[in-house]
């Protein structure tokens, strides 16, 4: 559970921000309790029929999405594409599957708790894969202004985190 790029993850030294280990533990437990209360509020009326695919880049999520989820959910029951910009109306009865690079905090916007699916990967392997992919995307279109092909497509360079990472590689090249 967390936010895309919000920091504050594990491995924080005990003296970070001048807090003691006990103070950090108290803050963590309070945050966890607050999240559990919010989840329970969303569950009060039962689970939502919405399937929220939290796609963490470079974890085989694209393969999982295309080979399994898209085959299981008819196209008319999928929410609008939301990889570059959130375009979802969770009150739309035809919005039964949302796939996005957003973070888990998006769940807090829903009235009911959705079913959440994600893929995980070894962090070092994921980091190296992300770097290699950013270089590949940069080289593929080196020196050209990139536009997605087709009106319903999104360019990789416009999707988080590539909108930031690829531009760093562009500058290095």
Image: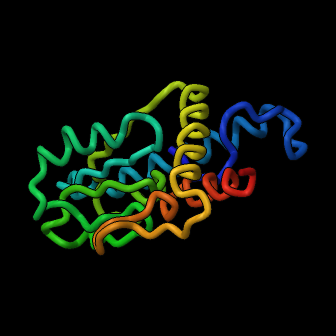
Q: Quadrant of residue 64?
A: top left
Question: Is 67 above or below relative to 155?
Answer: above
The residue located at (85%, 35%) in the rendering is 20
Q: On the rendered structure, is 127 left or right of 44?
A: right
Q: Nearer the viewer, residue 107 or 36?
A: 107
User: How far across and how far down the image is residue 100, in percent?
Assistant: 38, 56
Residue that appears at 75% across and 38% down: 24
Q: Nearer the viewer, residue 46 or 122?
A: 122
Scheme by which the image is coloured? rainbow
Compare residues 95 and 133 and report the one nearer the observer.
133
Residue depicted at x 65% and y 41%? 28
Image quarter for residue 106? bottom left
**Left or right of 73: which side holds 170?**
right
Estimate the x, y position of residue 61 in percent, counting from the top left.
36, 40
Image coordinates for residue 123, horizontal then vertical, percent: 57, 29
The mark tally for this picture is 0
Residue 2 in the image: above or below residue 149: above
Q: Where does the image place residue 102, in percent across and percent down from the top left?
A: 46, 57
* Residue in the picture at 39% in, 67% down: 148
Residue 173 vs residue 133: left or right? right
């Amino acid at each position: 559970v967390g936010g895309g790029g919000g920091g504050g993850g594990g491995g924080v030294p005990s003296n970070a921000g001048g807090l003691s280990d006990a103070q950090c533990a108290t803050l963590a437990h309070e945050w966890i309790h607050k999240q559990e209360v919010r989840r329970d509020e969303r569950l009060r009326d039962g689970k939502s029929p919405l399937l929220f695919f939290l796609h963490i880049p470079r974890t085989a999520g694209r393969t999982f999405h295309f080979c399994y989820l898209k085959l299981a959910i008819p196209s008319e029951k999928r929410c609008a594409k939301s990889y570059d910009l959130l375009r979802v109306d969770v009150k739309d009865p035809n919005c039964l599957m949302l796939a996005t690079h957003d973070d888990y905090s998006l769940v807090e916007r829903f009235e009911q708790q959705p079913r959440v699916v994600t893929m995980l990967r070894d962090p070092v392997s994921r980091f190296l894969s992300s770097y290699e992919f950013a270089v590949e995307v940069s080289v593929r279109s080196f020196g050209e202004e990139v536009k997605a092909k087709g009106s319903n497509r999104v360019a990789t360079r416009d999707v988080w985190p590539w909108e930031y990472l690829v531009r760093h590689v562009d500058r290095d090249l």
